[in-house]
Amino acid sequence: AVVGPRKILLRMLGNLLGIAGREGKSADAIRYLDAILAIDPESARDRAARMVAAVRIGRRDAAIEDARRAERDARPAQSGSQWACSWA
C-alpha cells in the first residue's frame, strides 16, 4: 500500500516525540506536538499530550488553552474535565 507524505511526516514526528518522551525533554515534545497538531488539528490524543507536556514545563496558560479546546471538542457523553483527567 502506498503511504502519502502526510502520514510519513506524522510518523516521523511521532518517532521524534517518542524519543523526546523517553529522554524527558518536554520542551522538545511540545515542538513536535505543535507540528503534529498543525498537520492534524483534530488529534485529541496529541492535544492532550501537549497539555501534559506544557504543565511539566510550567506553561500553564498553554495547558489551559488545550484543556479548553478539549472540552469544546469533547463528545456529549464525556465532559472535558473527565477527558483531560484521563491523560494526567
Image (tube, grey):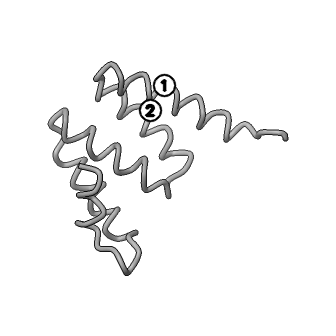
Residue 60 numbered mark, or none: none
Q: Which residue is mark 2?
A: 32
Q: Is residue 83 left or right of residue 61?
A: right
Distance, label 1 to label 2, CA atoms, is 7 Å
Q: Is residue 29 left or right of residue 88?
A: right
Single out the mark in the foreground, 1 or 2: 1
Q: Amino acid at mark 1?
A: Leu
Q: Does 37 sit above or below residue 30?
A: below
Q: Camera-side residue: 83 or 70? A: 83
Number of dots carrying numbers: 2
Q: Does 6 sit above or below residue 82?
A: above
Proximity of marks 1 and 2: CB atoms separated by less than 8 Å? yes
Q: Camera-side residue: 12 or 31? A: 12
Residue located 35% across and 71% down the image? 72
Residue 69: quarter of image: bottom left
Secondary element at image label 1: helix
Q: Position of residue 47 (x, y in %)?
A: 38, 50
Residue located 84% across and 39% down the image? 2
N-terminal label among 1 and 2: 1
Residue 16 numbered mark, or none: 1
Q: Position of residue 67 (x, y in %)?
A: 27, 58
Residue 49: quarter of image: top left
Residue located 39% across and 31% down the image? 31
Q: Does 13 sit above or below residue 39?
A: above
Q: Position of residue 84 (x, y in %)?
A: 27, 58
Residue 82: quarter of image: bottom left
Residue located 36% across and 23% down the image? 22
Q: Amino acid at mark 2?
A: Tyr
Secondary element at image label 2: helix
